Image (tube, rainbow, N blue to C red):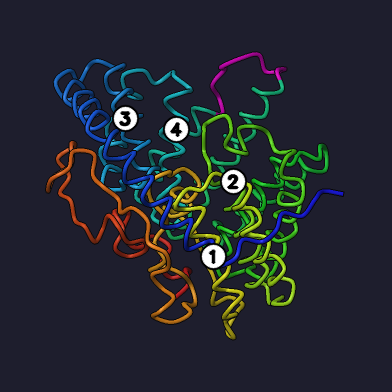
Amino acid sequence: MARRVQSVPPDMVRLLTIHAALVALMSAAEAEPLQSRAIEAWVREARQHPSDRRAQLRAGEALTQAVLNGDRVQFPAAVDLLERAYRLDPSSPHVMRKLGRLLNLPLSVGDLHYTDLQLELYRELVEVRDGTSSEPSVARQRFVDHCFLEATSAAAAYREGHPVRAVLQLRDLEQTIADQLQREDDLDLHAMLGNYALEISGLVRPGRRRRLAIAVRHLEQVVSRYDELSPAAQGIEYDVPGVRVVFAYWLAEATLAAGQPDLARDRYRAVPDAAATSEQTPAVIRMAWAAEQRLARMPEGNGFDLLPTWPYGYDSCVACHSREVAPDLSGWPNPLGEDAIGGPRAVDTRTVGGGDRCVADVPLDAKSVRNCGQDSILGEPRGMRRIVRP
């Protein structure tokens, strides 16, 4: 039987918060000028040589990493550079996947602005031959690409005025993953289906209860068997430190949203335990603190009021990837009161170039940098507004 890690006391969580913030500030002070100068130089080179695919890709990947680390104002520039790299070499699976995954960010909050480009990318990826089809890794990657294509196709159907078709396509997607799970009990697939079900339940009203049950069932598998996830899914392969805690927090929130507060309490207690075994990033500390707050003041109005579960959309990327910032609680569903909203504050997001403009000439709006939801660079969900949570 696995040894239970002792829960982190709230006072220790606050102490760790201060420590992590100071460490991040000191390390950022040392590393940021060098990193900023390098990224600025790469972006300038890409702008000066628009036909140089390698220059576009290098600058685009650097800005993508900045976005995932909390600098969301770089999102449009990252998309622009990666799309240029793709147009210069439409046969590169690496560039297509990099851009397609980045565009999942607005899609996850119902922003359908980029669906045409995503459809083009995922259709190409489903057809691309980037290895022997019998290789398990290639077959798995093609299956994942196919799932993203189905999700994007559903979003496009809704944008074009066909909501019923969109809902049916989402059900087909869920069934596709479930059928694959019948053939192989792969924990990465449990993670994929749990993630999809939780995300869709936050955007689409029809079938919410059923999807929440699916999300809870599969996230239970992920949290209880976490070490069986592939290195890529755990974030080890890409040096992503917050994955374990995000899954634990999602499971607790999904359980509470499903109307099981007693079970949710146990799962919130497990979040600081997961945090204690993870790298102490500001995001990890904030999620541990948020779980303690839920336990201390369990909201009376649980259920669908908690949808979409926090962290979601852009904030979920920051929670997993960032070592410098924490997801903002201004979009925390069913807030626990003004005194609890702010939570332990970590290092604020910075622009790569500093000053009042970022390196890609996107105006810096401090409010849009730090807040999630309607103030984010991604904007309010536009295409699916009629079926998202009021």
Q: Are marks 4 and 3 in contact (CB under 8 Å)?
A: no
Badge 4 or badge 1: first in the primary sequence: 4
On screen, residue 173 versus residue 107, left or right, reads right
Instruction: Kindly identify the residue that appears in the image at 37 percent across and 61 percent down.
Output: 345
Q: Position of residue 382 (x, y in %)?
A: 35, 61
What is the spatial separation of the Cα atoms under label 4 and label 3, in whole angstroms?
16 Å
Query: Please, what is the three-letter code of the amino acid marked with disc 3?
Result: Gly
Q: Which mark is residue 309?
A: 1
What is the spatial separation of the Cα atoms under label 4 and label 1, in whole angstroms?
28 Å
Q: Which mark is residue 278?
A: 2
The secondary element bearing badge 1 is classed as: loop
Badge 2 or badge 4: first in the primary sequence: 4
On screen, residue 291 versus residue 374, left or right, reads right
Query: Please, what is the three-letter code of the amino acid marked with disc 4?
Result: Leu
What is the spatial separation of the Cα atoms under label 2 and label 3, in whole angstroms?
29 Å
| Residue pointed to by mark 4 | 121
* Mark 2 crowd level (few <14, some 14–19, many ≥20, 10 Å Cα): some
Residue furthest to the right: 1
Q: Which mark is residue 60?
A: 3
Badge 1 or badge 3: first in the primary sequence: 3
The secondary element bearing badge 4 is classed as: helix
Mark 2 against mark 4, which lies toward the viewer? Answer: 2
The secondary element bearing badge 3 is classed as: helix
What is the spatial separation of the Cα atoms under label 2 and label 1, in whole angstroms?
21 Å
Instruction: Kindly identify the residue that appears in the image at 55 percent across and 24 percent down.
Output: 127
Q: Position of residue 263 (x, y in %)?
A: 74, 71
* Mark 3 crowd level (few <14, some 14–19, many ≥20, 10 Å Cα): many
Instruction: Kindly identify the residue that appears in the image at 42 percent across and 64 percent down.
Output: 344
